[in-house]
Amino acid sequence: MYVTIPGETAAPILSIGPRIRPNRAIQTRRAAGDYLFFEGDSVKHLYQVKSGVLRLTRLLEDGRRQVIAFGYPGDIVGFPLDGRHHTDCDVLVEAQLVPHRLAALEDGRRDPELHRDLVQAALREIAAMQDHFLMLGRKSAAERVASFLCVLVDRVGADIGRYRQVDLPMSRADIADFLGLTTETVSRSLTMLRKAGVIDIDNVHTVIVLSPAALLRQSEGQKVRAA
Amino acid sequence: MYVTIPGETAAPILSIGPRIRPNRAIQTRRAAGDYLFFEGDSVKHLYQVKSGVLRLTRLLEDGRRQVIAFGYPGDIVGFPLDGRHHTDCDVLVEAQLVPHRLAALEDGRRDPELHRDLVQAALREIAAMQDHFLMLGRKSAAERVASFLCVLVDRVGADIGRYRQVDLPMSRADIADFLGLTTETVSRSLTMLRKAGVIDIDNVHTVIVLSPAALLRQSEGQKVRAA
DNA sequence: CGTCATTTTGACCAGGGTCAAGACTCGTGG
DNA sequence: CCACGAGTCTTGACCCTGGTCAAAATGACG
């Protein structure tokens, strides 16, 4: 999951979900904390996320970290470079995964339909990452946090009466490393949204969106005024 | 071309160059200033760059711009999202291009070898973009500019006696929009590298690298001391 | 409960953005 | 061939966003 421009790539990734047959036989369950792979590992499978949340990270020698993406249902993770993984990947929320053999991506003859779907997934990945560039390169802290919440609400928001609720299973540090900020700044941005009446923070890991419209405006750069 | 972690993906993109047959008959020449495509256009071809430099850009409604990538020899540009281009693309330096029909990427049966190469190019693109995330999210201005020069020196640097020289055909504004900075900061960072004796600025569009080692150190975060 | 990690908040600071003025470049036309 | 002018690049002064450091509040868990 990346932070994309609102409306453009709305839920396209999910649309491939159904196309790739949910072969129940080869679905696998992974517990929170498990690592699926490390940077440098040779790629054996791509993983299609059916449920749960994954985290893809990349480290700089001096310890600076970038969360490359979160893997939400509908996402496919593990695209290789020269047959090797290019990030670490671990499980944030117990996940059901459908592994696809790497050969299905690299060779179209065995299973043409699956092959086509995996190639399409790679192309979506490229487009989504391009949007994410814009966010990392050009958006303010407040816009990034609001954009992040917008995407999550669209992708995995749950209706609760009049409002929508979204779960943030990852830590503030994860969000910060994903958005190119610090934990303090993420925390402050959330507080501002709360004080402006845009969201409510039910508990640290649960946000309730009071005004989706205001959140969207905020993600596009309009300043919110305190309520 | 993206800013990648030094040494990791060094020149891998070039390695596919020879593999894709340089079918002379369908090579095309495009003048500086030409647009290859705009965001939203339906994708007819991918373009493999043989010579010259392309620029891929994406705009926010309010005018903020992100240069997604520069297209240098060996790069392939134009990967579609749902059959449509997701960036604008124009020519910075007169370029020789090899167009590949979109069908070759989407359908493996017609030309399996070309198909395989294009898929590999897409995978390299994903890995390179992941590295670029780290740069946009976590590196300082000085590190970004130094990293950018490092990549260019490796990819298109020319030996001139004792030193290596690199051309910057794009404007400072292009570099800024690529690195998530402002033109002023790019300019200042280059001046610092010059005053530190790491580079020489022959003219606005030509940089001579006096100390590749110092440039690499700078790209990884060590501060340079003025010489 | 007590301990330890995470989150929030505050005070302070600096990296880099903004605004403005000069220096360069380069194309055009007199 | 040179003068002009528009665009680009550099430099300086100032300031603001967001980072740093520290401490308090909250939460997780044995």
Image (tube, coloured by chain):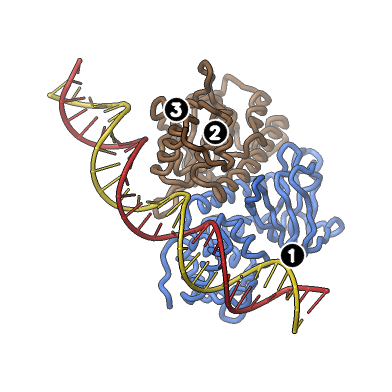
Chain colours: A blue, B brown, C yellow, D red
| Front label number (1 vs 3) | 3
Q: Within 10 Å of the Cα at label 3, are there few (<14), some (14-19), or many (20+) other Cα atoms?
A: some
In the rendered view, would you say A53 is above or below B113? below
Q: Chain of mark 3?
A: B
Residue drawn at (58%, 36%) of the image = B217
| Front label number (1 vs 2) | 2
Q: Chain of mark 1?
A: A
Q: Secondary structure at mark 1?
A: strand
Residue drawn at (72%, 54%) of the image = A19
Left or right: where does residue A124 sit relative to residue D29?
left
In the rendered view, would you say B181 is above or below B47? below
User: Which quadrant of the figure has residue B211?
Assistant: top right
Q: Which residue is mark 2?
A: B215
Q: Which mark is residue B200?
A: 3
* Dot 1 and dot 3 within a common chain: no
Query: Disc 3 versus disc 2: distance between alpha carbons?
Result: 12 Å
Residue A27 pos. (x, y %): 83, 58
Which mark is first along the chain, 2 or 3?
3
* Dot 1 and dot 2 within a common chain: no
Q: Chain of mark 2?
A: B
Q: Which mark is residue A93?
A: 1
Can residue B95 be seen in this snapshot?
no
Q: Nearer the viewer, residue B188 or B116?
A: B188
Q: Nearer the viewer, residue C8 or B78?
A: C8
Residue B15 pos. (x, y %): 67, 27
Q: Within 10 Å of the Cα at label 1, are there few (<14), some (14-19), or many (20+) other Cα atoms?
A: some
User: Which quadrant of the figure has residue A181?
Assistant: bottom right
Q: Within 10 Å of the Cα at label 2, are there few (<14), some (14-19), or many (20+) other Cα atoms?
A: many
Residue drawn at (64%, 26%) of the image = B17
